[in-house]
Image (cartoon, rainbow, N blue to C red):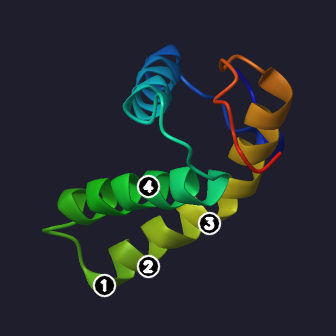
Amino acid sequence: MTMGDGYALSEQSMRVAEAGIRGMIKAACGVSITSYVMIEAALHVLAAWVASSQTGSTTAERDADFEELERLLASFIDYHRSARWLPNPHRVDN
C-alpha cells in the first residue's frame, strides 16, 4: 500500500496496526469515550514504543526518528480516513 509522499506500508505493519486498533476499540467496548481519549491512548502507545526502541540512540538519531514520525503522521491519517477498513468505533463525538 502506498501512502502520500510515496511511503509504502508493509503487509506486516498493516496487520499489526489493524490488530492494535481493533484491540483498543474492543477495550473500550460498552464504554462511552471520545475520539480524543482514543487518540491520546494511541499516542501513548506510540510514544512508549518509540521510547523503548531508542534506549541506545543518540540525540541526533532520536531527533531524526521524531522528524520522520512527524512527516509520516499526516499521510497515515489521510490514508485511514479514506481506507475505511475499521469497524465503526461508536464514537460519541460525531
Judged by depth in the image, the label closer to the viewer, 3 or 4, is 4
Q: Out of 3 and 30, give the one closest to the viewer.
A: 30
* Residue 78 image label: none
Q: Which residue is mark 2?
A: 63
Residue 87: give x, y in percent of width and height: 66, 17
Quarter placement of the N terminus: top right
- Crowding at label 3, few (<14), some or many (≥20) Cα neighbours within 10 Å? few
Q: Are marks 2 and 1 in contact (CB under 8 Å)?
A: yes
Q: Out of 29 and 76, give the one closest to the viewer.
A: 29
Q: Are marks 1 and 4 in contact (CB under 8 Å)?
A: no
Distance between the alpha carbons at the discs numbered 4 and 2: 22 Å
Q: Which residue is mark 1?
A: 59
Query: In what element is the residue under mark 1?
Result: helix
Residue 74: give x, y in percent of width and height: 75, 55
- Crowding at label 2, few (<14), some or many (≥20) Cα neighbours within 10 Å? few
* Residue 41 image label: 4
Q: Amino acid at mark 3?
A: Glu
Q: Residue at x 48, y 70 (%)?
A: 66
**Mark 4 or mark 2, earlier in chain:** 4
* Residue 70 image label: 3
Distance between the alpha carbons at the discs numbered 3 and 4: 17 Å
Distance between the alpha carbons at the discs numbered 2 and 3: 10 Å
User: Viewed as shown, does residue 68 lie left or right of 88?
Assistant: left
**Mark 3 or mark 4, earlier in chain:** 4
Judged by depth in the image, the label closer to the viewer, 2 or 3, is 3
Q: Residue at x 41, y 30 (%)?
A: 20
Q: Amino acid at mark 4?
A: Ala
Quarter placement of the C terminus: top right
Query: In what element is the residue under mark 3?
Result: helix
